[in-house]
Amino acid sequence: MRVECENCSKAFELPDDRLPAGKKISFPCPGCKSKITLDLRKKPEPIAEEPVATADESQGKVVFSPIAEKPSGELDGSDLKRKILNSIKDLPPMPKIIYKAREVMANPKSGFKEIAEVIETDQAIAAKVLQVSNSAYYGLSGMVSSIHQATVVLGHKTLEQLITMVSATSLLGSHLKGYRMGSGTLWQHSLAVALCSRLIAKDRAPAMENDAFSVGLIHDAGKLALDRYILERKTLVDQALTAGITFLQVEKQVLGFDHTELASDLCAKWKLPENHVSAMRFHHDPGASKGNQLAYIVHTANHIAQKSGIGSSMDAALYELDPGALAFLSLDEEDLSRYNEATIEAVGQITQSLT
């Protein structure tokens, strides 16, 4: 097999009999030492072009022609992605209250009263903050009766995570028909990834505990924007899925880009921290993140959440843990098992408090 490094363009031949069929492998480039990844798993058969019905108003009939344009009217992936990015003019409600709360909490002159006032600007979120504050997860069952009390008892770090979490319930609770995810499925998965990311960060990178939780919670937010476009291409998606590929690969095949690219572009547009942008972009492939610890944490948490069965996608079994993730984070299989059990318990405690 002829292989070419995308970084330095060095090309070389690998003996076919030394390549492990059906596996995804990575190795350093002999020239520049950058990472090269080969996916030797079963490739999808080329998708035949489908005729598209278009109305001929002058003749009053329907004319079929070879597919040339996407259902949305876009000609290629870059144009479609640009259209989606331009259509999302502002931050959705979830980040707005999060960043306002962070701004207040970062001000040393702000007290618990000011923080409580920010939360109380959204009564729905305030009610959920009280609900979850009293959950078994925080060990305060029946003890928190006001937002002001919650801010005092929980502390800034925990309160920030709590606001992030409850702000996401409605946003991530949507029914994603294109991705075949029922109402609440994405929310449960995202919550599991957020909680597991926090556990890993607490052990391996305490300074980024809040960042790990926040990115874990919104790591799949790109799917919210892409769902309608995936649904429009249902026939193409169905054909691709029969070949046994992941939905991530399906996105690339039918759209020209995937949800990680869109989400990272949105994060950059909203001027989120660079490590957040990188972690969103590479949470499926942390080896390409140039050593972004946050990307490795969220990737590992995503793998654990998929295997736990909490809000798992239909193709969860196809997603593999990056071969270098455990070594990078100094973890082993026992750690994964421990995080898995803790995540299942935590998600159960929190979701119970929200029902």
Image (cartoon, grey):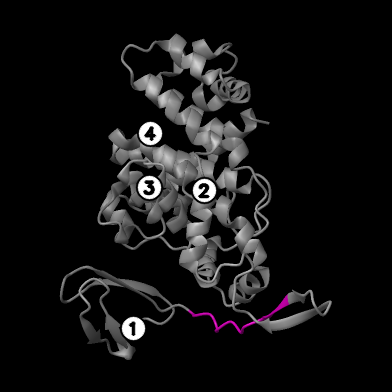
**Whole-Å distance between the Cαs marked 1 and 4?**
41 Å
Q: Mark 3 points at which residue?
A: 268
Q: Quadrant of the C terminus?
A: top right
In the rendering, which numbered label is found on residue 210? 4
Quadrant of residue 353 in the image?
top right
Is most of the magenta stretch helix, strand or loop? loop
Task: Say if mark 2 contacts mark 3, CB within 8 Å.
Answer: no
Residue under the image location 61 percent in, 84 percent down: 48
Q: Which of 301 and 35 is in front in this view?
A: 35
Q: Residue at x 27, y 53 (%)?
A: 328
| Sequence-earlier tag: 2 or 4 | 4
Observer-nearest residue: 342 or 114? 114
Q: Name the residue under label 1.
A: 19
Q: In this picture, which residue range is highlighted in magenta?
A: 42-53
Residue found at x 28% / y 34%: 207
Residue 221, label in figure: 2
Q: Is residue 335 visible?
A: no
* Dot 3: element: helix
Q: Position of residue 96 (x, y in %)?
A: 49, 32
Q: Which of 38 and 306 is in front in this view?
A: 38
The question of residue 251 being in magenta is answered with no
Describe residue 207's horizontal placement relative to residue 199 as left or right. Answer: left
Residue kind at label 3, given as amino acid type: Ala
